[in-house]
Image (tube, grey):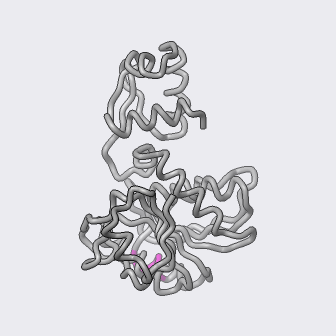
Amino acid sequence: MTKRLDRILKILSQQHKVTVIELAEDLHVSPATIRQDLTVLEQEGLLVRNHGGAELRETDDLAHRMAINYEGKLKIARKAVELVDEGDTIFVESGSTNALFVKELTATKRVTIITSNAFIARKVDPVRGGSVILIGGVFQRESESIVGNMAKSNIDQVNFNRAFLGVDGFTMETGFTGRDMMRADIVSYVVSKAREVFILTDSTKFGQIHLSRCCRLEDVTRIITDNNLSEQYRSAFAGKVDLILV
């Protein structure tokens, strides 16, 4: 992705709606060039075109959540790729950063991805790729997540050493939390099976509390987040978990 496309996503993540003319003036290119850029980003599922411009939709749709703070999430995703070896079998749960992680990972390494999210399964590189195991269960249409007891039964039938998880919030009192009770239940089940647990999330999630606890800090092996993490949490994590800042 070019620097100009990255810049468009950054502007959209801040404003959520922008016109072609505004982007052309800001980026010093022609409106025709901006329209071509918006078409590329729409095809990637990162924005929605409207009359005269583009916008982000505030939904649980991972494609649109990926576009918010895209650059920061991509840095986290690329750092996580370094921690995976060729031929590994890993579990990847839902989350916009995890979607970018799978896309970057399978473009460079052949691995087996086990996931509870259909959107993430589709992000596996179609050329180099590797194997994808999408567990079965109750399908949540908007988030494309698979949940429920059948999903747990499917998880029992596969083996993996590492799990890469996305979360919606964290405080020292509540641990890692999620907005959806059924998805949080799947995360907790995956954590109970994995030898190593990796949290991939941007720093805005720290200090937030959501409905259901996914896991405790002591369940986690590594946290990969951006360099904007507050000193409060940097100090709190010292000696408790491996913290990687990008």
Q: Residue at x 36, y 74 (%)?
A: 235
- Name the residue nearer the viewer: 24 or 142: 24
Q: Position of residue 182 (x, y in %)?
A: 34, 72
- Count of picture labels: 0
Q: Residue at x 74, y 63 (%)?
A: 110
- Name the residue nearer the viewer: 61 or 205: 205
For the N terminus, the quadrant is top right
- Name the residue nearer the viewer: 56 or 5: 5
Q: Classify 12 as above or below 88.
A: above
Q: Residue at x 63, y 53 (%)?
A: 104
* Residue 23 shown in magenta: no
Can you tell which quarter of the image residue 88 is in? bottom right
> From the viewer's perspective, is 204 left or right of 71?
left
Q: Residue at x 66, y 69 (%)?
A: 84
Q: Position of residue 18 (x, y in %)?
A: 35, 26
Can you tell which quarter of the image residue 124 is in? bottom right
Q: Main secondary structure of the magenta part?
A: helix
> From the viewer's perspective, is 74 left or right of 218?
right
Q: Position of residue 219 (x, y in %)?
A: 43, 84
Q: Classify 110 as above or below 47.
A: below
Magenta span: 148-152
Q: Classify 117 as above or below 73.
A: below
